[in-house]
Image (cartoon, rainbow, N blue to C red):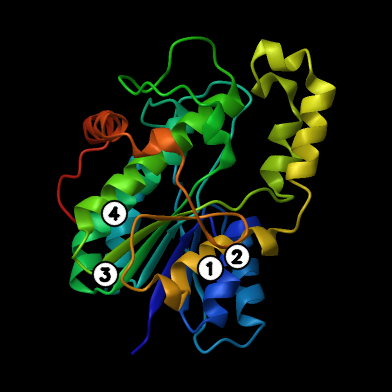
């Protein structure tokens, strides 16, 4: 039986390397991205290693909740995936709204993977055993932990708001693992650490992404960022590939896989049921799951 895997933001960087690793493990891989040209090059790269199954590309702007709903329908039409890797992530130096009028960092980094996962849950349960892997980030440690609204109090600083959205998604991930325990759907978080990607080579060079106090220390902060993001994307993809494929995780759920591609303790605030409840309330308000994709 063909095992299918879907990787969002899978046309470059860590997502592409994750897709390459899943194809090597025997999955038929679908990569999702915005740009058809990058999608074609990603498919060519994956197929160049002569995997058992040819890769394919699906175009979707994951900043749009409507596009996420349409993507879920297209994925569902092909049957249940065995693995869903929500790799999508974006950081913005300036505050932006998504096409839905939602602050873009929260929309892309949390609401998009939340909604896609929730829409596909019935299929993932029906096709179990299956795995959901949500990519997290060390930036969660810089985040404000209040989720009464999309935007936290205080000014906009891209790195910190990115971390807050990733914290929301990690809290959701761990809560989802508890909710799905016993269904055959295993839910994991994967922390890639750092790598040289478009985001780290671009947005993370702008001092506006950090709070004013850290801007005063920008040369030091910049050196820390550079050290943390100097590795290859192929290494940073290993935690996601491990979470999606490793036999040692069979029958387990709610595990966070760290940058060394081994389970690590979860970040404490993400395990707080009050944080998870607030995130879930806000997510359901902003991105209601009207009808599951089947």
Is 233 placed left or right of 272 in the picture?
right
Front residue of this view, candidates 155 and 63: 155
Residue at image position (37%, 23%) is 150
Q: Are marks 3 and 2 in contact (CB under 8 Å)?
A: no
Q: How many C-alpha atoms fall within 10 Å of the one at disc 2: few (<14), some, or many (≥20)?
A: many
Comparing 50 with 140, the one in front is 140
Q: Which residue is mark 3?
A: 77
Which residue corresponds to the image point at 74% horizontal and 45% vertical from the top-left?
229
| Residue 98 image offset from top left, x and y in percent | 44, 31
On the image, numbered disc 4 is attached to which residue? 177
Which residue matches tag 2?
238
| Residue that badge 1 annotates | 241
Number of disc labels: 4
* Of the image marks 1 and 3, the number of the one nearer the N terminus: 3
* Quarter in which the N terminus is drawn: bottom left
Q: Identify which residue is drawn at 33% across, 47% down.
A: 174
> Quadrant location of the C terminus?
bottom left
Question: Residue pushed farthest left?
Answer: 291
């Amino acid at each position: 039986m063909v095992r299918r895997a879907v990787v969002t933001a899978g046309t470059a960087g860590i997502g592409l390397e994750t897709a390459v690793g899943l194809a090597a493990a025997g999955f038929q891989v679908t990569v999702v991205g915005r740009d058809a040209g990058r999608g074609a090059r990603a498919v060519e790269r994956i197929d160049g290693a002569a995997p058992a199954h040819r890769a394919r590309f699906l175009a979707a702007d994951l900043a749009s909740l409507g596009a996420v709903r349409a993507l879920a329908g297209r994925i569902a039409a092909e049957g249940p995936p065995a693995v869903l890797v929500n790799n999508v992530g974006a950081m913005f130096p300036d505050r932006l709204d998504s096409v839905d009028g939602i602050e873009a960092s929260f929309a892309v980094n949390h609401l998009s993977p939340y909604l896609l996962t929730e829409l596909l849950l019935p299929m993932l349960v029906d096709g179990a055993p299956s795995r959901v892997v949500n990519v997290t980030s060390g930036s969660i440690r810089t985040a404000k932990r209040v989720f009464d609204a999309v935007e936290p109090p205080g000014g906009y600083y891209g790195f910190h708001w990115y971390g807050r959205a990733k914290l929301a998604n990690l809290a959701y991930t761990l809560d989802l693992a508890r909710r799905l325990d016993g269904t055959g759907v295993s839910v994991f978080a994967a922390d890639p650490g750092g790598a040289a990607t478009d985001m780290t080579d671009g947005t993370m060079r702008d001092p506006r992404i950090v709070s004013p106090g850290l801007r005063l220390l920008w040369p030091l902060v910049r050196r820390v960022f550079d050290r943390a993001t100097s590795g290859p994307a192929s290494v940073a993809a290993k935690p996601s590939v491990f979470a999606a494929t490793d036999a040692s995780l069979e029958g387990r759920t709610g595990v966070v896989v760290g940058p060394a591609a081994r389970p690590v303790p979860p970040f404490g605030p993400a395990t707080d049921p009050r944080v998870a409840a607030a995130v879930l309330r806000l997510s359901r308000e902003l991105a209601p799951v009207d009808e599951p994709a089947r």
